Amino acid sequence: MKKLACLPGLAALALCLSLPGLAGADMRSGLDKALRAMDHAVGPAFQKIAVGGLVERTSGLPSPLCGKVEQGLRSGLRRSTSRQALEAGQDPSQADALLTGDYLRQGDKVSLRLVLLDPKDTKIWQGDCVLPASDFTAADFQTQALVPTAPSPDLATQQAAEEGQVIPKMPGSDGQQVPSYGAYYGGFLPFFHVDMSLGYKSFFPINSSFQSALGGQVGGLTLGLSFNDILLVDFDAWGKDVSGLGDLQSLIYTGTDFSLVYPLRLGNHFILYAGPGGRFGSLEADDSVAPAGSVVYGNNGFMAVAGAKVKDHGLGLDLRYTYDMSYSYTGYHTLTLGAFYEFGL
């Protein structure tokens, strides 16, 4: 009977012991959701992230809560993303970016603002999440004076103020627009990326006699490179059997296009672009009566380029149109559809 009488007390004790774990699960869920949003918005860049410098929003000072949230963010980065989180004591110069922010207690909730900074203190991403205040004790909200540190201009020279915390230069709360994924990913910030594409290109000859020989359209393969969505380079090739046109047997085209375009970014994943370009190619005509068996013609042109890209997490589609405004032998309209993989250098 005495053993049975103890059971309600043991059950109550077990419930009390489990409450911190349940509260921790609430914090973990909120942080994971914010980190997944960051991971989706930032894309493949910034793989090594230092976490630190979290402060209370009003005072600008750290508290024990900051250390708990920072550790939760490190664990969440490993758990919810493919990124590497530096440990609290690691040298922040090894990181590609710094995840920091501030918090404000509002009744039974903690409003957490997270900011991702590059080594030049440029905001890459900003997000908010809400944590239950019950996840923390009253002592966790007690702010602490910072240990004075020498000012540092960038992430590489920031020092630990306490227990491995990285003290960043916090962005102001002046309503400055946070750069989107598309904005920082276009070469205006210190990040360089390349698109490698494989596509199908349709050539529509402008020259009327050439149209009759090719049937008005000929398709070929194109290999493309795009540097920061600004410099475009394409390597094209097509072949066409034209037997029945006198001595001609076939035509083979190889060429390289260079374009310099302006990217207009609409949201995080969509880009429109346009600009001038040049086509440098050669047309080889297989002629049965030619002494060398074939004749090669230069086929260069100056063209206008317009297109659109859709990209997400390093993969995308590119639809492009070009028109030859001047040319040496025959000009083209071209229409290209390519799939590309994007990576940073």
Image: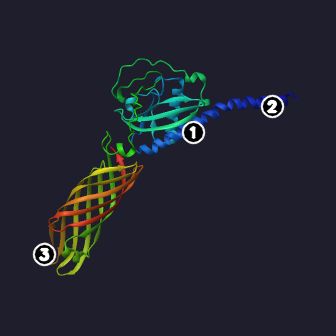
| Neighbour tally class for label 3: few under 14, some 14-19, many 20 plus, Cα within 10 Å | few
| Neighbour tally class for label 1: few under 14, some 14-19, many 20 plus, Cα within 10 Å | some
Q: Earlier in the sequence, mark 1 or mark 3?
A: 1
Q: Which residue is mark 3?
A: 290
Name the residue: 36% across, 19% down. Answer: 150
Residue 102, percent across and down? 48, 30
Asked if the residue at tag 3 contacts the one at tag 2, i.e. Cβ–Cβ closer than 8 Å, the answer is: no
Q: Earlier in the sequence, mark 2 or mark 3?
A: 2
Nearest to viewer (mark 2 / mark 3): 2
- The colouring scheme, among rainbow, by chain, secondary structure or one colour, is rainbow
Name the residue: 24% across, 75% down. Answer: 214
The numbered mark at residue 7 is: 2
What residue occupies the far front of the structure in this picture?
Answer: 174
Name the residue: 44% across, 17% down. Answer: 147
Residue 223, percent across and down? 30, 58
Q: CA distance from mark 1 to mark 2?
A: 32 Å
Q: Which residue is mark 1?
A: 29
Q: CA distance from mark 2 to mark 3?
A: 103 Å
**Identity of the amino acid at label 1?**
Ser
Q: CA distance from mark 1 to mark 3?
A: 75 Å
Say above or below: 104 vs 178: above
Front-lying residue, 309 or 242: 309
Front-lying residue, 152 or 104: 104
**Identity of the amino acid at label 3?**
Ala
**Identity of the amino acid at label 2?**
Leu
- Helix, strand, or loop for circle 1? helix
- Helix, strand, or loop for circle 3? loop
Could you tell whether 136 is left or right of 149 in the image?
A: right
Dividing the picture into quadrants, the one containing residue 198 is bottom left
Residue 267, percent across and down? 40, 49
Could you tell whether 317 is left or right of 281 in the image?
A: right
- Helix, strand, or loop for circle 2? helix
